[in-house]
Image (cartoon, rainbow, N blue to C red):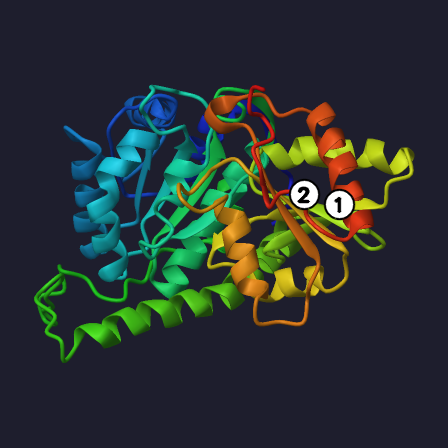
């Protein structure tokens, strides 16, 4: 079948809902929370209108229960999906470990929202990055198209390596902003994403299993190791699935870090999510002004793209890491990861951390240009002025 995209003008949240529909999810369990709610509202609308088959929607009393229901459904062999944000994701935290520990390929969309207090409903990556050690893969979308594509790819990767996956989009900047999204005809989605073949199922009564039973010190260690090996395998699978997606639908995701105008760059901006669209626009302007600068968008934070970062770092003089998050007592989380990856290598660019946009504060092209001026001066001097720059701090 020839690929002819179906173009719709939808929000990031609706893009996620359509992707879940096209993935033929069988169980959705979720609890409403701003700014995620319209994802599950749209899925409920699909069900009410008779647009989906064999989809069970489970209404629950909390996000903790939502993930518990997804765990049960996935363990029974179903393709399970949920969505949440911020405090809801924090409430899920315990069950995230159960999902990965049970090797269940659940896909969840997290609409990035700043953690309270103080209360905020705006964009901030701390909620998802606080879950980085739970054994979930994490894909960060720059735009609504990547939300849609990301959900479909996340299911395929997750079901190949038997680990859960999180697709992350920005609150309001993507979740409630409408844009053109090229959707894939159902027949081609079915070709790309065939029915799930579970690693095990609780409904296979001829081959009974126990899930989440006691792991003694003689066994527990190996369970953790197997999860890590699956995460390492995911790096290869992500690239293969991203390449296949590109060959079928014209949008290539074979690289875990997307590079933009980096071939001759002296330094690059590195970040994740929607802010990288602003960065790319700024890079074009800076190039016209004589700056040799590029952008490196980290698509997958887990598993972390170690090799791709090294290949980038050894060919530039500096990296400006833009973190819309922060780890208290340390630094920006992406910055911290990048430094750790490069410590035992021969790549030694100057790396500086810029904390930007916390709680949804605007991050503009003008901001990127100012950071470029500062980064250029740092490189020319050959040493950092400060390692972590709270760029948006009111002074």
Q: Nearer the viewer, residue 241 or 101?
A: 101
Q: Mark 1 sits on what residue?
A: 378
**Does the CB distance between marks 1 and 2 fall below 8 Å?**
yes
- Callout 1 environment at 10 Å: few (<14), some (14 to 19), or many (20+)? some
- CA separation in Å, label 1 and label 2: 7 Å
Q: Is residue 343 above or below residue 30?
A: below
Q: Residue at x 49, y 20 (%)?
A: 176
Badge 1 marks a residue whose secondary structure is: helix
Say whether residue 2 is visible: no
Question: Taking 267 as reference, is 241 above or below it?
Answer: below
Depth check, mark 1 against mark 2: the one in front is: 2
Q: Is residue 214 above or below residue 385?
A: below
N-term-proximal mark, 1 vs 2:
1
- The answer to whether residue 169 is above or below residue 97 is above
Label 2 secondary element: loop
Outermost residue, bottom side: 218
Q: Label for residue 385? A: 2
Q: Residue 129, how many percent across, how many down? A: 41, 44
Q: Quadrant of residue 167?
A: top left
């Amino acid at each position: 079948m020839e690929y002819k995209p179906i173009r719709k003008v939808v929000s990031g949240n609706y893009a996620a809902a359509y992707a879940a529909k096209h993935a033929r999810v069988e169980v959705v369990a979720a609890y409403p929370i701003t700014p995620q709610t319209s994802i599950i509202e749209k899925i409920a609308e699909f069900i009410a209108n008779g647009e989906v088959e064999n989809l069970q929607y489970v209404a629950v009393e909390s996000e903790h229960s939502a993930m518990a229901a997804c765990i049960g459904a996935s363990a029974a062999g179903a393709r399970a999906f949920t969505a949440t944000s911020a405090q809801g994701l924090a409430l899920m935290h315990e069950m995230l470990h159960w999902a990965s520990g049970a090797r269940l390929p659940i896909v969840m969309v997290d609409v990035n929202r700043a953690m309270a207090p103080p209360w905020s409903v705006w964009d901030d990556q701390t909620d998802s990055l606080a879950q980085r050690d739970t054994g979930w893969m994490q894909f960060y979308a720059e735009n609504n198209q990547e939300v849609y594509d990301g959900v479909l790819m996340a299911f395929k990767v997750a079901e190949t390596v038997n680990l859960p996956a999180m697709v992350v989009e920005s609150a309001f900047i993507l979740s409630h902003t409408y844009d053109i999204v090229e959707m894939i005809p159902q027949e081609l989605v079915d070709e790309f994403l065939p029915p799930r073949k579970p690693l095990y199922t609780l409904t296979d009564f001829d081959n009974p299993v126990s899930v989440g039973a006691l792991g003694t010190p003689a066994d527990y260690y190996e369970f953790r190791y197997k999860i890590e090996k699956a995460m390492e395998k995911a790096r290869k699978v992500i690239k293969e699935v991203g390449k296949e997606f590109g060959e079928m639908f014209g949008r290539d995701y074979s690289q875990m870090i997307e590079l933009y105008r980096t071939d001759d760059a002296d330094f690059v901006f590195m970040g994740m999510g929607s802010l990288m669209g602003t960065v790319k626009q700024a890079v074009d302007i800076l190039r016209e002004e004589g700056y040799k600068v590029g952008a490196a968008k980290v698509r997958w934070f887990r598993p972390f793209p170690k090799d791709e970062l090294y290949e980038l770092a050894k060919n530039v003089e500096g990296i400006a890491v833009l973190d819309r998050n922060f780890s208290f007592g340390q630094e920006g989380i992406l910055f911290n990861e990048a430094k750790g990856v490069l410590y035992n290598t021969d790549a030694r660019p100057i790396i500086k951390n810029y904390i930007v946009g916390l709680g949804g504060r605007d991050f503009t092209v003008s901001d990127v240009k100012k950071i470029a001026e500062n980064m250029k001066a740092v490189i020319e001097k050959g040493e950092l002025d400060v390692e972590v720059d709270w760029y948006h701090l009111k002074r």
